[in-house]
Image (cartoon, rainbow, N blue to C red):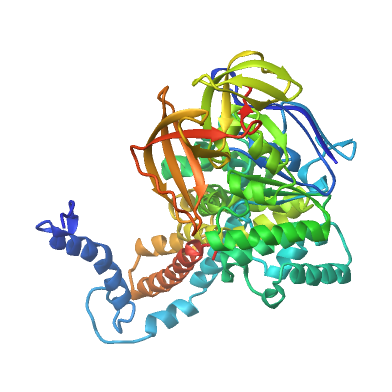
Amino acid sequence: MIEIANVTKVFGQGEAAFRALDGVSVTIDENEFFTLLGPSGCGKTTLLRTIAGFVDPTSGSVKLDGQSLLESPPYKRPVNTVFQSYALFPHMTVAQNIGFGLEMQGKPKSEVQETVAEMLELVRMTPMADRQTGQISGGQQQRVALARALAPRPKVLLLDEPLSALDFKLRKEMQLELKRLQSETGITFIFVTHDQEEALTMSDRIAVMSEGAIRQIGGPRDIYDHPAERFVADFIGDTNFLEVELLRTEGEEGRIRLASGAETTARALSGGVSAGTVTLAVRPEHADLADPAEALLPGTLAEVVYFGTDTHYHVDLEDGTRFVVRQQNTPAQVQRRAAGDRVGVTFAPGVGQVLRD
Amino acid sequence: MARGFDVRRQTGFNTIAICCFILLYAPIILIVVYSFNKGNSIAIWEGFSWRWYISAWDNEKVQAATIRSVVIAFWASMLSTFAAVLAALATTRTKPWRGQSFIFAMINQPLMVPEIVTAVSLLIVFASIKVATGYTGLGYLVIAHTAFCIPFAYMPIRARLQGMDLTLEQAASDLYATPWQTFRRVTLPQLTPGILAGAMLAFVISLDDVVITEFVKSAGQDTLPTYMLGQLRRVVTPEINAISTVLLAFSVLLVTGFFLLSRTRKQ
C-alpha cells in the first residue's frame, strides 16, 4: 500500500517558483491498477517521479507499507519504472537489459537467467533475447522495458505514459497486455497518462489531476458518470454544461430547476454545493430528443452530425446554450430530423450531475 | 522553386576555393614528394629512392627523439584524458552550480592563452622547481603536455556526455544500481568512443608540440618536432621530409580515427 500525504513540490525560487505538486494526498492499495490522469503540466509525472525517487518533494510524506520512502535513494526503493522513452540500455542485448536489475540486486547467475527467461516468456519476446535493442520495433522495445521493470518483482510498478509512442492499433493491444500482466503478476501499477480513454479502459481507480492537485479520485464509471467538478467533466469525455438553480438537497439527490422552468432531480455530492445557481453536467449520450412540448428543454436543432456508429444533434436551447445529444444509429431508425426543426431535449431524473466549482 | 542564398553559385567561388586548397595542400605534397628524392636537395628532383627513410630510421638521434615523443604523448594523453573525463562529468552530470560557465572557460584556458606565454611561465616555474628538487627528467614535459592537452581531450568527451540520454542513468538507478555501478555499467560503456577520441586527439596535439616543449625541455630532451627544428638550423636534407611524412601519416591516421569515433552515435 502506498500512502502519499500532503506532498508539495516547488521548483525554482521567488518569482519564478512553480508549484508542480500542491498538497497531494492519495492512498493506493495493493494490487491496484491506479491511474494518474491529467493534461500535460498537471503534475502527474512529478508525482510519479517522487515515488520513484527522482524528485525530492518540498514537503509531505510518501510511505510504502508504512515505511517512508523519502530517505532512500532510487536504487534502494522496491519500485521500478517504465520510462516514456523506454530508456533501454543501447549497449546491451534484450536479455541483458531484462537481467540488469536482478544483477544489480546481486542475485545469483542461475536465478537471473531463470527470471529473464520467465520474463521473456511473459512479454512474448523469447525469440528476441539476443537482439540489440536498436534492432527491435517500438512495440517490442516497450515490452522489453516492461519486462525489465517487472523482473526484480517490485512492490510497485510506475508507468510514465508508456503507450504514448505507439500507434493506435498497437496501443490498443498493449492496453490489454498491460491489464493481463498486472493481474498475472499481482503488482501494484501506477500508470500516468493524458489519454482519458486509456485511463477509463484500464484502471481500477483514476485520480484526475490539474494544476498540481488531485481533483477527483474514483472508479472509471464514477469519474465518468459523476464528475465532481467542471474540470473533470470537461476533461473526460464530452459534456453539456447548464446553468440551473439548486432548490434543495436530500442526501445525494438534488432538486433542480432548469432555465426553461422545468424541475427534475440530479446527483449532487454533499459538501461544496449549496442551494442557488449551480452548474449541471449532462453527458450527450444520457440525453434524448423529444417533442418540444414534453421535453425539459425546448429548442431548435442547429446541426446534425453523422458519425457512423452514432449521430450528434446540436440543439440551440431557448436561453442560447448549445446542447449536444448523442444517439446511437440503428438500422430501424425511421424518424429523421433536420436542422431547423423545433425539438426538445430531455434526460431522466438523476442523470445530471451538479458540479462543485 | 525559390532558392535561398547559395554561396556556391556566386562568381569566383570556385577560384577562391581552389586557391585555398592549393595553399593548404601544395606545400605538404611537396614535402612528401621530396622525401623520396635520391639526391641531397629538397628542391631539385633527382629520382626516386627510399634512401632518406632508411637514413632517418638508422639515425640514433631520430630514434631517441621519436621514443621520447611517444612516451611523452602517451603519458600526456592518458593523464589529460583522465582529468578530462572527471571535468566533463562535473560539468554535465551535476545540478547547475554557481560559476559553472566560469569553470568551463577555465578548463579551456590553453585554447585562449597564447602558447608562448604559457611556455615562458612554465620555463620560469620549472626552473625554480629544478633548482629546489634537482629533478631534471621527462616529468616536466609530461606535466606541461598534459596541461595543454586537457581541453582537446575534454571537448569530445563532453560532447558525448551531453548527447547521452540522462534517463538511461536514471533507469539504471531505478534498477538498483548504485551511483558507481551506474557509472561503470551504463555511463562508461557509452562514453568509451568519446574517451578514445579525446585520448587520440590529445596524443596528436602532444606529439606535434614545438613551442612549449622547446622552452620546457632540458638539454638532450629533444622530441621529434624540436629535433627537426634544430636540424633545419643546420644542413637541410630530405631526411627532414621523410620524418615529416611519417609524422604526417601517423597524425592523419589518428585524426581519422578520432573522426570515426566521434561520429559513432548510439544505434
Q: Is residue A32 left or right of residue B212?
A: right
Quadrant (top left/top right/bottom left/bottom right) for the N terminus of chain B: bottom left
Judged from this view, the residue extending furthest toward the front is A293
Q: How many marks?
A: 0
Query: Which residue: 42% across, 35% down?
Result: A343
How far from the left and from the top, in percent, is residue B214?
47, 52
> Please, is residue B246 above or below residue A286 in the view?
below
Q: Is residue A198 left or right of residue B178?
A: left
Quadrant (top left/top right/bottom left/bottom right) for the C terminus of chain B: bottom right
Residue A152 appears in view:
no
Q: Quadrant of residue A142?
A: bottom right
- Seen from the viewer's position, the closer of residues B124 and B26 is B26
Residue B179 appears in view:
yes
- Seen from the viewer's position, the closer of residues B220 and B37 is B37
Q: Is residue A323 left or right of residue B141?
A: left
- Seen from the viewer's position, the closer of residues A66 and A102 is A66
Query: Which residue: 55% across, 42% down?
Result: A285
- Seen from the viewer's position, the closer of residues A288 and A23 is A288
Query: Which residue: 60% across, 28% down?
Result: A211
How far from the left and from the top, in percent, is residue A225?
65, 38
> Please, is residue A245 above or below residue A227 in the view?
above
> Please, is residue B62 above or below residue A78 in the view?
below
Q: Quadrant of residue B231?
A: bottom left
How far from the left and from the top, in percent, is residue B134?
67, 46
How far from the left and from the top, in percent, is residue A48?
70, 41
